[in-house]
Amino acid sequence: MSLFERYLTVWVSLCIVAGIALGQFFFSLFHKIGGIAIAKVNLPVAVPC
């Protein structure tokens, strides 16, 4: 197994923690982005990653 595969649980956990932290520190920014709608679909859903 590669290094990435071996520690996949760690990487996922770190991404979850980073996402929660960013949401706490930049709440108003994420709230504004989530409020933008295109054709009655909010922006995070309308724009693919």
Image (cartoon, rainbow, N blue to C red):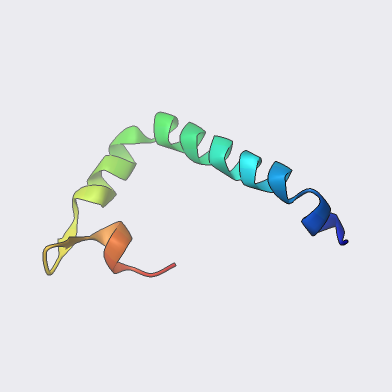
Residue at left 79%, top 57%? 4
Query: Residue extending furthest top?
Result: 24
Image height check: is 38 above or below 32?
A: below
Displayed quadrant of residue 48: bottom left
Apparent side of residue 14 relative to residue 23 in the rendered image (left or right) = right
> What x and y, as percent, mark residue 32?
24, 45
Apparent side of residue 6 relative to residue 27 in the rendered image (left or right) = right
Quadrant of the frame with the N terminus: bottom right
Displayed quadrant of residue 5: bottom right
Which of these two is toward me, 7 or 25?
7
Which of these two is toward me, 5 or 37?
5
Residue at left 56%, top 35%? 17
> What x and y, as percent, mark residue 22?
47, 37
Query: Residue extending furthest left?
Result: 40
Apparent side of residue 36 relative to residue 49 in the rendered image (left or right) = left
Quadrant of the frame with the C terminus: bottom left
> What x and y, as percent, mark residue 27?
34, 34
Residue at left 26%, top 41%? 31
> What x and y, as percent, mark residue 9?
70, 45
The total number of labels drawn is 0
Apparent side of residue 45 relative to residue 22 in the rendered image (left or right) = left
Residue at left 82%, top 52%? 6
